[in-house]
Amino acid sequence: MKIVIIIAVLIVGLIIVMLSQRRSKSSNTQSGSEPKKEQIDMSNSIFYHEDDYRQVEIIPDENFSELIKQAENVQDFAEKHFDGGGYTDMMVREENGFKLKQRGIKTRELDLILSELPIKRYTEVSTGIRPGEMTSKNTFGYGENYNGIFFDFESDSVTGIWVAGSPSVENEEFAQALNNIGNKWSLLLMDWNSLELIDLKDKEQIEKYLN
């Protein structure tokens, strides 16, 4: 009788061990199937808020007339849909007819000009609503979190240039860098926040805008 009881206890114990192992394997499988969150080294990266993406953008001067028309449309939209506390509708800007990529600006060429600014260069860039939220791939930045000049690229060709906030650099130095970019590639700066259009080939216009 004692032998039967001992055998029964051993069987029950073995079943408990097997069930425990199954649960452990199941738990490991589930945790392994979850996507790992991307880790961003915040000590060696720069951040721009997603709302600042191309709000102050640098684009080819072939789009001049188109930009004037779009700015007028934005102004009309704002007057029509602002109720004093906010906007009652949302407007999506049209894509520029002549794309920056068509200018054939090489990343190393733009890098060379921007590297003359006395601000730090980053090849790791994050965006979203807080630093480190998500990686902004194929993007370089100069400055500090929330305040800098950025550009993105595809296959060594620059596809977009924009300014976020106010880079910590003297206006004269920043104006010169923007003027160098404008003269080299015939570019404009469009500030969609203030609806100002600046010819980057005209340094006086740039200085007035920055001041």
Image (cartoon, rainbow, N blue to C red):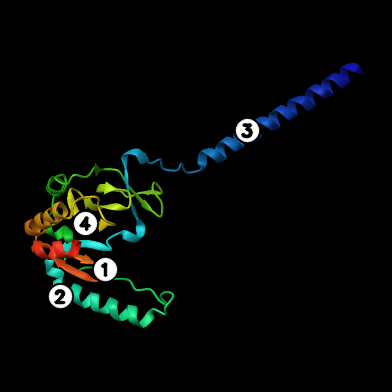
64, 167: nearer the viewer: 167
Labels 1, 4: front one = 1
Task: State the CA–CA distance, disc 4 to disc 2.
Answer: 20 Å
Amino acid type, callout 3: Ser
- Mark 3 falls on what kind of element? helix
Amino acid type, callout 1: Trp
- Mark 1 falls on what kind of element? loop
- Which residue carries the number 2 mark? 65
Instruction: Work out whether mark 2 precedes mark 3 in sequence or the reverse, and give the earlier one.
Output: 3
- Which residue carries the number 4 mark? 161
Task: State the CA–CA distance, disc 1 to disc 4.
Answer: 14 Å
Whether label 2 touches label 1, CB < 8 Å: no
- Mark 2 falls on what kind of element? helix
Task: State the CA–CA distance, disc 3 to disc 1.
Answer: 55 Å
Whether residue 92 is visible to the viewer of this picture, yes or no, is yes
Amino acid type, callout 2: Ser
- Which residue carries the number 1 mark? 192
- Mark 4 falls on what kind of element? strand
In which quadrant is the N terminus drawn? Answer: top right
Tell me if 12 is positioned left or right of 86 in this view: right
Image location (x, y in percent) of residue 112:
12, 45
Which circle marks residue 24 in the picture? 3
* Quarter of image, res 86: bottom left
27, above or below 207, in the image: above
Amino acid type, callout 4: Ile
Instruction: Work out whether mark 3 precedes mark 4 in sequence or the reverse, and give the earlier one.
Output: 3
Labels 3, 4: front one = 4
Tell me if 68 is positioned left or right of 201 in this view: right
